[in-house]
Image (cartoon, helix red, strand yellow):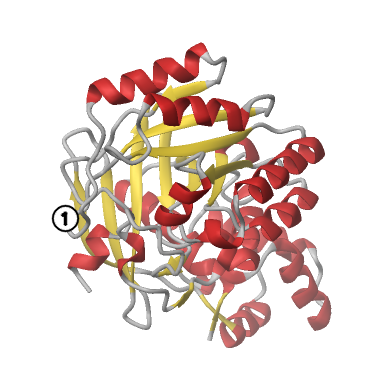
Amino acid sequence: MESIYNYTKEMLIDYMLNLGEKTFRCNQIIEWLYRKKVKSFDDMRNISKSFIQKLKEDFCINRLNLVIKQESKDGTKKFLFELEDKNKIESVLMKNDYGYSICVTTEVGCNMGCIFCASGMKKKVRNLTTSEIILQILMVEEIENIKIGNVVIMGIGEPFDNYDNVINFIKIINYPLGLEIGARHITVSTCGVVPKIYEFAELDLQVNLAISLHSAYDDVRSRIMPINKKYNLDVLIKAIKDYVDKTGKRVTIEYILLKDINDSKTAALKLIDLLKGLNVYVNLIPYNEVLEKPYKRSSEASMRLFFDTLKKGNINVQLRKEQGSDIDAACGQLRSKNS
């Protein structure tokens, strides 16, 4: 039976029109699901019993099964959930000065093959449904008794490889009578699936877009990120320019610093040249080392030199605060250990 969490407002309205029901019921159902967080249709007290019976015949209110929860000394928490088909996914909760943020997974496994990433150690099994992405938020809020205000779509999988479900997820969590997470508090990250960047720009959703870049050299990027062989830097930068022009929004450039691979001053200067004139913001990320991978994090001195070089080159940049380094923090590590 299909999860009701798969349905956007528009889909629910179509469903009700087909039944001859009043469309105002849609807002009532959304409020029960996402504000009051009922676990049974029978708890929707302002809806007729006959319509509740119809909902029960057509939909389920499903859950995820918590397998493991890890907690870092800095307060970061990682959750391993089991899906109905016994596949496992991860979610990460971070507490910041501005509130709680969650990093959600969009696929079971990943086929992008970035060589430093734990997510790709297990190949893609399938896309997550919209409901399975939403339930990561609902389950973590329930387990921790908190309200999540920021969502990063940057866990296991390539979000633009599961495009339709991710877009529906964004619409649902942004809806005012639902979870009401503001568009500017939602970030979707892609490793560079260029056609979807153009498509995403046309939606004008006002959410934040992040691009995992990790090198300004085509040969290096192709070696560490196979997607670059299909959509090289020239093609990717053109798509970023188009996105900025269409939306007027700044793009975040994610850059993981890998020792002796992409962390030299020369690499920083090349990055300045690549990004010159673009409305972008560079997020430098200390590497969470993966036991099964040979790659090492850059030294503090190298990270600082890289940061300072970008600053002097008039690039908006931050060196991200490290979180969860004492647990299986890198995407895919916890799942790999428990599959």
Please name whichever residue, 175 or 38, is drawn nearer the observer in this view of the structure: 175
Q: How many marks?
A: 1
Image position of 236 with respect to 256: above or below: below
From where the camera sits, is residue 337 visible? yes
Check disc 1 and report the residue beneath it: 291
Q: What kind of element bears circle 1? A: loop
- x, y (%) of residue 160? 59, 61
Q: Is residue 93 left or right of residue 67?
A: right
Query: Neighbour class for label 1 at 10 Å: few (<14), some, many (≥20)?
Result: few
**Left or right position of 106 against 57:** left
Q: Residue at x 81, y 69 (%)?
A: 22
Please identify the quarter of the rendering in which residue 280 is found.
top right
- Locate residue 130 relative to residue 296 in the image: left or right: right
Residue at the image point whose x is 66% and y is 56% from the top: 194
The residue nearer to you, when weighing 291 against 5, is 291
| Amino acid found under the numbered disc labelled 1 | Leu
| Residue 182, placed above or below residue 47 | above
Tell me if residue 128 comes above or below residue 186 in the rendering.
below
Does residue 270 appear left or right of residue 14 in this picture? left
Q: Position of residue 146 (x, y in %)?
A: 38, 42
Does the rendering let one see residue 98? no
